[in-house]
Amino acid sequence: MAPALAQDRFSAPRERMMKHHLEGRGIRNLDVLRVMRVTPRHLFVPPEFSVLAYDDQPLPIGHGATISQPYIVALMTELLEPAKTHRVLEIGTGSGYQAAVLAQLAARVFTIEIVPELADSARDRLKQLGYSNVSVRAGNGYLGWPEEAPFDRIILTAAPPSVPQALLDQLAKAGRLVAPVGPLRDQDLLLFEKTGDGKLRQRRITAVTFVPMVRGRE
């Protein structure tokens, strides 16, 4: 599904990313590592930042949004544990990079972006690159995507003060939800697991810094 990556000017930076920023920092899931290696991050950032695409840092993508650093993308994907049978909901499409990673690991990806311009550009980019199992919607992530629920996995790429109840309700039993939560300078990456009887377990993973999740009109 991912475009083939020939030896190019990004080959060396891509391998440095894999060795130092992912494997070197404890990412162990082989499927996650494989997908991170073949997903062309330089095509998901503005051209002026492509030289920095494989550095371990977030980069601006316009409209006050950022693309997360590779380590965080890999960590959140590893925590999510997506499988080929899963339907995944992403809140915060951005440039579409996280959706592209998930598209190679799950059956379907549904992704919501509150900025229409970002949603449109991500939709076009994902289509051009061949990620045909991704559906992009411009809308309010706080509401989720109720007509497609329940979801086996849910991931948030912007930080709400607390996880919206609508998203917890749309998480399937035995599902996982990964989200940065809290105010700008005091956020935690949290993992929620819903048991077979519908109860939620919550675990703190690490401190993080994400852009705030914007609340749209209800």
Image (tube, grey):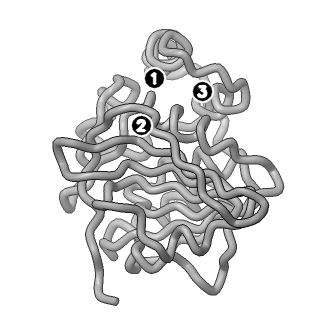
Q: Mark 2 points at which residue?
A: 42
Marks 1 and 2, how far apart at CA:
8 Å
At mark 2, the secondary structure is helix
Q: Which of 123 and 73 is in front in this view?
A: 73
Q: Mark 3 points at which residue?
A: 37
Marks 1 and 3, how far apart at CA:
11 Å
Q: Which residue is drawn at 38% across and 57% down?
A: 94
Extreme residue toward the right, this view: 85
Contact (Cβ within 8 Å) of mark 1 with mark 3 = no
Q: Picture coordinates of residue 103 (x, y %)?
A: 66, 52
At mark 3, the secondary structure is helix
Q: Quadrant of the C terminus?
A: bottom left
At mark 1, the secondary structure is loop
Q: Can residue 204 be seen in this view?
A: yes
Contact (Cβ within 8 Å) of mark 1 with mark 2 = yes
Q: Is residue 114 above or below residue 33?
A: below
Task: Name which residue type carries label 2.
Answer: His
Q: Nearer the viewer, residue 163 or 31?
A: 163
- Give the total of numbered labels: 3
Q: Picture coordinates of residue 89 (x, y %)?
A: 58, 64
Q: Earlier in the sequence, mark 1 or mark 3?
A: 1
* The quarter of the displayed image where residue 146 is located: bottom right
Q: Kindly identify which numbered label has been placed on residue 10.
A: 1
* The quarter of the displayed image where residue 197 is located: bottom right
Disc 2: CA contacts within 10 A as few (<14), some (14-19) or many (>=20): some
Q: Which of marks 2 and 3 is nearer the N terminus?
A: 3
Front disc: 2 or 3: 3
Task: Name which residue type carries label 3.
Answer: Arg
